[in-house]
Image (cartoon, rainbow, N blue to C red):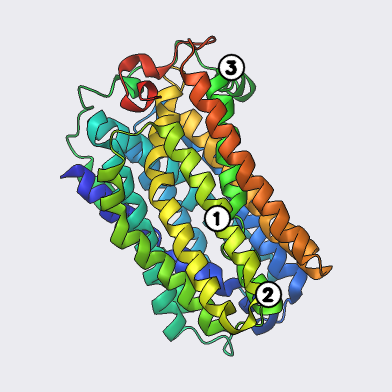
Amino acid sequence: MRAKLLVLASSIGMLGWGAVLPYQYAYAADTRGWGALAAAAASSLFSVGALVAAPVAGRLSDRYDPVAVAVLAQLLGAVGVGSLVLADSTAAFLGGMFVFGLGLTAAVPAKQVLVLRWVDSSDRRRVFAYKFTGEALGMAAGAYVAGHLVDLRDPQGLDVGFLTAAAGFAISSLIIGLAGRGATIHPGSEIVASPAARPMSPLESMRAVFATPALRWTAVVTVTLALGFYAQFESGLPAYAITTLDIDTAAVGTAAAVNAIVIVVLQVIVVRLTANRSAPTLLMAVGGIWVLSWVVLSTAQFAPGVAAALFVTTYGIFAVGETMYSPVLSPLTASLAPRGMVGQTLGAFAALQTTFSALGPLVAGVLLGAGLTTGFLGLHIAISALAVYAAWRLRGALRRPQPGPATASSAGSDDAVLVA
């Protein structure tokens, strides 16, 4: 029951992502008249807040109750995004966006640790899959509601998005707090039950995390798969569609909807079909799906009559890979974490993903702005192929004894031993 409540809370907590982020650039730059520089700075500060929050929240989740970390983080996010209703200056808006990113991302490793504490290892992939699907639905619902209610001609036109985000955080915090009452650590969850022997500095923590070869290759997989799709989902891909393929915005919206629908329809089926497959093998498959998606997308510019259909199809293909990505990567990362450092490890990987995803709009802007469409497409095919190679090296690393600090895999996590 606690896992179900956590999935529900995660879904509601992501309403703000969909209700605010797709519209904040135009709101800051045009509606409020603060200019493109301020709008870009708001996006950057949101990402900076996320980057700062993830490793800190992960560390706190190891040392303190992750329920409290998740609840307080989301309440902080609610204050940040709620304050944007009152923001009448560039500085106030930038500060609110920074705190918004801080609160939203700080809750992520805490929620992941809660899954590991409350769920038996045999069910973790399934629960992570439900959690990912719920978050996708939450983002889609937030974007849908805001899309019908936001008025970017009015200075108060995005207030409904800000208030939706704040309410989502508050309700999510309440649900997590209720779910955590009287909770005990699952008997099969020793990987998160023991704190580190002594406090470690952030640098020492990072050294401990990446002392394991398998974790280093997992980091490469995390970065390349993030760059190969998620970094371009909200910026590069729509920009390519509109500027190069001459596709209208309705088709872009349809593609995003198809992506969400495919995830919802296939998620449970894919988890069942892949239950006995090793995590590295599935991550190799995800990289291969990313490669296929970019190849299909590359053909669209040579077939303008069906370019829109190919673009929408590509988002559907990406979604198939997404159904394997999130349910597999988080449990695998946790299973390889140094003992007592699961939260810090998950936080470090979330920070990595956030950092490199933030580079996506910059890369797309430079290449597409310079007319280097072939370079844009070729780069992402190469990045996706590198993800396949990294996952293959990860599989080999998991077959060898792991040097460095004692890892949580010794606690018996399925993802640490399923390597064939």
* Residue matched to label 2: 302
Q: CA distance from mark 2 to mark 1?
A: 16 Å
Image quarter in which the C terminus is found: top left
* Amino acid type, callout 1: Leu
Count neighbours of disc 1 (C-alpha within 10 A) and say few if under 14, some if 14 to 19, many if 20 or more. Answer: some
- Residue 155 location, quadrant: bottom right
Q: On residue 211, which mark appears? A: 3
- Labels 3 and 2: the sequence-earlier one: 3
* Amino acid type, callout 2: Phe
Q: On residue 35, which mark appears? A: none
- Kindly indicate whether the residue at mark 1 contacts the one at mark 2 (C-beta within 8 angstroms): no
Q: Secondary structure at mark 3?
A: loop
Residue 284 rendering spot, x and y as whole percentages = 50, 39
Q: Residue at x 38, y 51 (%)?
A: 323
Count neighbours of disc 3 (C-alpha within 10 A) and say few if under 14, some if 14 to 19, many if 20 or more. Answer: some
- Labels 1 and 3: the sequence-earlier one: 3
Q: Residue at x 42, y 85 (%)?
A: 148
Q: On residue 292, which mark appears? A: 1
Q: CA distance from mark 1 to mark 3?
A: 33 Å
Can residue 228 be spotted in the picture?
A: yes
* Amino acid type, callout 3: Ala
| 163 relative to 264 in the view: left or right | right
Mark nearest the camera among 1 and 3 is 1
- Residue 36 location, quadrant: bottom right
Residue farthest along the right direction in this orientation:
370
| 157 relative to 411 in the view: left or right | right
Please determine whether, in this image, residue 320 is positioned above or below residue 371: above
Residue 49 rendering spot, x and y as whole percentages = 60, 49
Q: Residue at x 46, y 16 (%)?
A: 399
* Residue toward you, 256 or 283: 283
Q: Secondary structure at mark 2?
A: helix
